[in-house]
Amino acid sequence: MSVRACVFDAYGTLFDVAGAARIAAAESGGEPGAAEDAAAWADQWPRIAEDWRRKQLEYTWIRACTGAHTDFWQVTADGLDWALEAVGLQGAPALRDRLLALYRDLPAYPEVAATLSTLRDAGLRCAILSNGSPDMLDRAVASAGLDGAFEAVLSVEEVGVFKPDPRVYALIERHLSLPPAQVAFVSANGWDACAAAGFGLTAIWLNRRDAPLDRLHAAPAHVLPDLSPLPDLVRSL
């Protein structure tokens, strides 16, 4: 086995980024606030979740390109504000506050804990490399019950720029003392997996949504539907 470590993106890969909107809708019975229509919120939450994630990522790319860095919590809040305004819910501060609170405690995908345990039992080193700020990542790992699952939790804040800047991927070798070829990098973001492949990492794309492959300068070595097949794949590498 030439791969000695598995490094994971966090949001969308380990943690379900639609979870905040889904949980808020379920716990409120569809009611976003006294001034809002309950049925409208029940219908809107999938769109809000989708727009929120899209704008969050777009803002990281724009800030990386322009050098206007801020932390991931700020772009998360900015993305939510755009998504709420897009459906006319910018006047629902209680809903906004609840969604942001839930985002700090996103659920892990169902297969995450068992997959990480199997990888560690096989002698693989596990780490996170994420756009998330350190406090966000610490909170997410703890709330998902994954304390102790990772040798390192690495944040882009160490280099002050978001993915896919190469300085982010270079953090892996800096902290794990492994060359890129000995690291499997796992992400549910196609663009992230492509960029990691271009950096020289053994990139694995979790295509959770059965999407087309991004047309970029490099491509992931492997594509999986979720994390469950990962231990067998890594053992074969």
Image (cartoon, grey):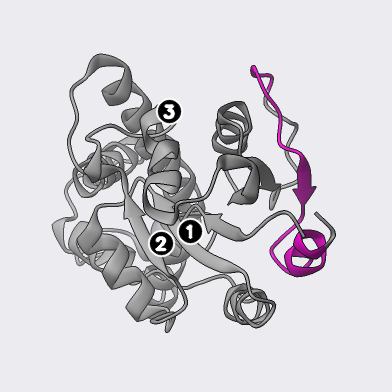
**What residue is disc 2 on?**
21
Quarter-of-image position of residue 1 = bottom right
**Element on which disc 2 rests:** helix
**Element on which disc 1 rests:** loop
Q: Is residue 24 left or right of residue 33?
A: right
Q: Position of residue 46 (x, y in %)?
A: 51, 53
Please state which amino acid type lies under the numbered disc 1.
Answer: Ala
Please state which amino acid type lies under the numbered disc 2.
Answer: Ala
Decide which of 207, 176 is in the foreground and name it.
176
**What residue is disc 1 on?**
18
Comparing marks 1 and 3, which lies closer to the viewer? 3
Please state which amino acid type lies under the numbered disc 3.
Answer: Pro
Magenta stretch encompasses residue 95 = no
Q: Residue at x 68, y 80 (%)?
A: 118
**What residue is disc 3 on?**
166
Circle 1 packing at 10 Å, graded few (<14), some (14-19), many (20+), is: many
Q: Is residue 219 left or right of residue 106?
A: right
Magenta stretch encompasses residue 228 = yes
Which mark is first along the chain, 3 or 1?
A: 1
Q: Which residues are magenta?
A: 215-235
With respect to residue 23, does 224 lie above or below? Answer: above
Q: Is the Cβ of the residue at disc 1 closer than 8 Å to that at disc 2? A: yes
**Element on which disc 3 rests:** helix
